[in-house]
Image (cartoon, rainbow, N blue to C red):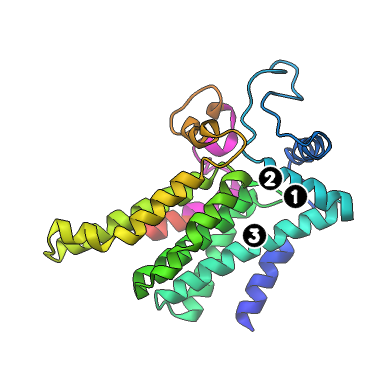
Amino acid sequence: MGAAAIFGLIFLVAAVPVFDADLWWHLFTGAHIVASGSVPSSDLMSFTYHGRPWVDHEWLSEVMLFSVYRIAGLQLVVGLFGLVIAGAFFVMYLTMRLRSVNPLLALVLTAALASTSIGTWGPRVQMISLLFTAIFCYLLERYRLSGRRSLLVPLPLLMLLWCNLHGGFAIGLAVMLLYALGGMLERVLERDRLRSAIGAERPLVVALAAAIVVSFVNPNGLRTVLYPLSFLTPNAFTNSIQESQSPNFHLTGMLPFEALLLMLLA
């Protein structure tokens, strides 16, 4: 009952119709792709950048958004993202249970995690990357605990979808790399030979290589793969995006996140 209440509350809060400012141009772009049958490679809407090269790394999400909107309107779009957000936190909860975390503690931590990110919720395409990141961590954790190679098979397939839904797919590649390096380091610290440690992680390395290869299967090819790199260093583009700036702990909405950071340090 407690789990149902927590995840039901997350869904209800996430499904409140507060529309993201970017939603309109996602719908416009989706309508353009459906009508033209092609993904734009140059800016369609802005005045100052009209006609300039543009990497539409979210094209498949935009087609899905427009299709849902055309069938049932904005409320279903918001409800769909409510399911995506609640699903992401549910998978996080399952991952904690895999690690033998007490069910009550796992629910408390899930609620705390949700409260720190509530300000970013809404019909925002990056919520899809939140869900995919949670799924990748869950599958990788199950693989780490069981050693079943079949758990790695879905990862490249999911990456093929993710790289066309949102540029956050690079997080999935990074998580896979960290799991592989972490597994090797654990074996080396256990005084295993480096060659044996690398060999033990070969299935995960192969899955990572496959995920990298399929990430090129998108309308923009290499441009989409390189797009996430634009967020690694400060520049005129990232400096104008709120999500790329340092958290402002003077805002009330950031207090839960600050509390969680302090708990982590403690």
Question: Which quarter of the figure is the N terminus placed in?
Answer: bottom right
Question: Which quarter of the figure is the C terminus placed in?
Answer: bottom left
Q: Residue at x 46, y 45 (%)?
A: 213
Residue stretch rendered in magenta on the structure: 240-258
Confirm whether residue 18 shows in the render.
Answer: yes
The residue to which callout 3 is attached is 85
Q: Secondary structure at mark 3?
A: helix
Whether 200 is drawn above or below 234: the answer is below
Q: Are marks 2 and 1 in contact (CB under 8 Å)?
A: yes
Q: Position of residue 128 (x, y in %)?
A: 62, 52
Q: Are marks 3 and 2 in contact (CB under 8 Å)?
A: no
Q: Position of residue 40 (x, y in %)?
A: 71, 30
Q: Which mark is residue 124?
A: none
Q: Amino acid at mark 1?
A: Met
Q: Secondary structure at mark 2?
A: helix
Whether 92 is drawn above or below 78: the answer is below
Magenta residue check for 9: no
Q: Earlier in the sequence, mark 3 or mark 2?
A: 2
Q: Secondary structure at mark 1?
A: helix
Q: Amino acid at mark 3?
A: Ile
Q: Amino acid at mark 2?
A: Leu
The residue to which callout 1 is attached is 64
Q: Earlier in the sequence, mark 3 or mark 1?
A: 1
Q: Position of residue 152 (x, y in %)?
A: 43, 63
Indicate which label's residue lies in the foreground, 3 or 2. 2
The residue to which callout 2 is attached is 60
Going by the image, does 229 lie left or right of 73? left
Indicate which label's residue lies in the foreground, 3 or 1. 1
Confirm whether residue 256 shows in the render.
Answer: no
Mark 2: few, some, or many residues within 10 Å (few <14, many ≥20)? Answer: many
Marks 3 and 1 sit apart, C-alpha to C-alpha, by 16 Å
Q: Residue at x 28, y 60 (%)?
A: 201
